[in-house]
Image (cartoon, grey):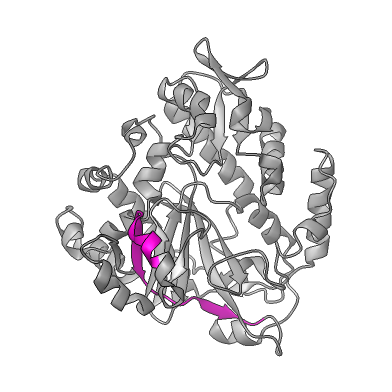
Amino acid sequence: METLNRECFCLGLDPLALHAQLDVILAASGAPASLAESHPHLFSALPVFVSRVHIDKVARVVAVIDEIAKTAAYQHAVMAWAPDIATFDPGSPGGLLGLDFHLGPDGPRLIEINTNPGGVLLNAMLGRAHRQCMPELTIAPAEAIDVEDAVLAVIQTEWQLQRPDTSLAMIAIVDETPAEQYLYPEFVLFRELFRKHGYASQICSPAELIHRDGRLWLDTVVVDFVYNRLTDFSFAQQGNQPLRSAYLSHDVVVSPHPRSHAIFSDKRNLCLLSDGEFLSSSGLSQATIDLLLATVPRTERVTPDNLDALWERRRRLFFKPAAGYGSKASYRGDKLTRRVWQDIGKSAYVAQELVPPSERRITTEAPPLKVDLRCYAYRGVVLLHAARMYQGQTTNFRTPGGGFAPVLTTRALPAA
């Protein structure tokens, strides 16, 4: 697979054609800009090749993360640094997860977990548009999964677990100033998916929501379900108080919810997942412990006691805010200045063993692009893989030739 990532330049898709396909959908919602102009680096033309061995190992890691997240020891530990709202359990896992991996010589390494991962429906479109040049390869993880159906089933399962005896009618897709978000096109795809299957659906900001009479309202319409894309993970900001109060009163189903972020996505949780002593005390099998220690880079909290030692080791570390998202305020240790280091010392940060990403060449002349592997999963089951190709310190959508890319792997062997 490494050879293919260096030398295979056969065209996988036409990004302009895919942009045009999305433009038609967006035009129906009144979005005036062409995606080719506003999002020129959203999609890469080429796929990323990942070995079946790596794909299968990622699947095992996903299952193990789901297993450990249910243990009393793990939940007790993460609640030590979680916000108070996370103690409220609405009764569901909290929706789709995005698990991000770097692929090194020792296999996939889990660098973070996200509870509101963007891109799943965009990457479903990307996979359908991909023109296969090698029939022996397949979109990972398998051809059998219809991603749109699987994503809809996640929403329906979240609803059924929280409201088993009630019909779902209205789904609101909520984010701060949604039309200004880079992945707003995906919000439209979600809205159209929900409407296609008979649900009312609107895209809105939390400021448009009102909590009264035991219901959450958008104008004169009752909101049953909030598909939450906010990055205020604990609903602490003033503008999110109607949503917060409706959620805590069980007057609306929210997914992903604050508890799911605390259980899965706080970066401090990676300290537990890479701590052999903690894992050994959690009642896990030795095989599970070995898998986690081989996959999760060693991560530790930044504290006043280890600040000096971490500065000395900084060139081998990557620093992330505990409640960060989208690589914001994250730093490679070798790029740190003393001023930034002082800010890190005053904030909730973790230091993670630096794991260089793999690479993909898109031409023979240009330098290779870095690659992250994102795995979309729910309840321990992988739904889709996608790659993000970029240049720079962290993933972005500003690199010519970069952006989301389909992941190709060898076909799975039939069961014996």
Res 220 → quadrant:
top right
Res 170 → quadrant:
top right
Horizontal and vertical percent position of residue 260: 40, 41
- Front residue of 140/300: it is 300
Residue 319 appears in view: yes
Q: Residue at x 46, y 71 (%)?
A: 102
Residue 354 vertical placement versus 203 (above, below): below
Left or right, 20 with respect to 330, comes to right
Q: Residue at x 51, y 58 (%)?
A: 328
Return the residue found at the far bottom: 365
- Front residue of 7/371: it is 371
Q: Residue at x 51, y 18 (%)?
A: 166
Residue 37 vertical placement versus 54 (above, below): above
* Count of numbered badges drawn on the protein: 0
Left or right, 281 with respect to 203, comes to left
Res 298 → quadrant:
bottom left
- The question of residue 342 being in magenta is answered with yes
The stretch in magenta equals: 341-361
Return the residue found at the far front: 339
Left or right, 400 with respect to 318, comes to right
Q: Quadrant of the N terminus?
A: bottom right
Q: Quadrant of the C terminus?
A: bottom left
- Front residue of 37/194: it is 37
Left or right, 102 with respect to 88, comes to right
Horizontal and vertical percent position of residue 386: 58, 62
Horizontal and vertical percent position of residue 106: 38, 79
Residue 132 vertical placement versus 173 (above, below): below
Horizontal and vertical percent position of residue 74: 24, 48
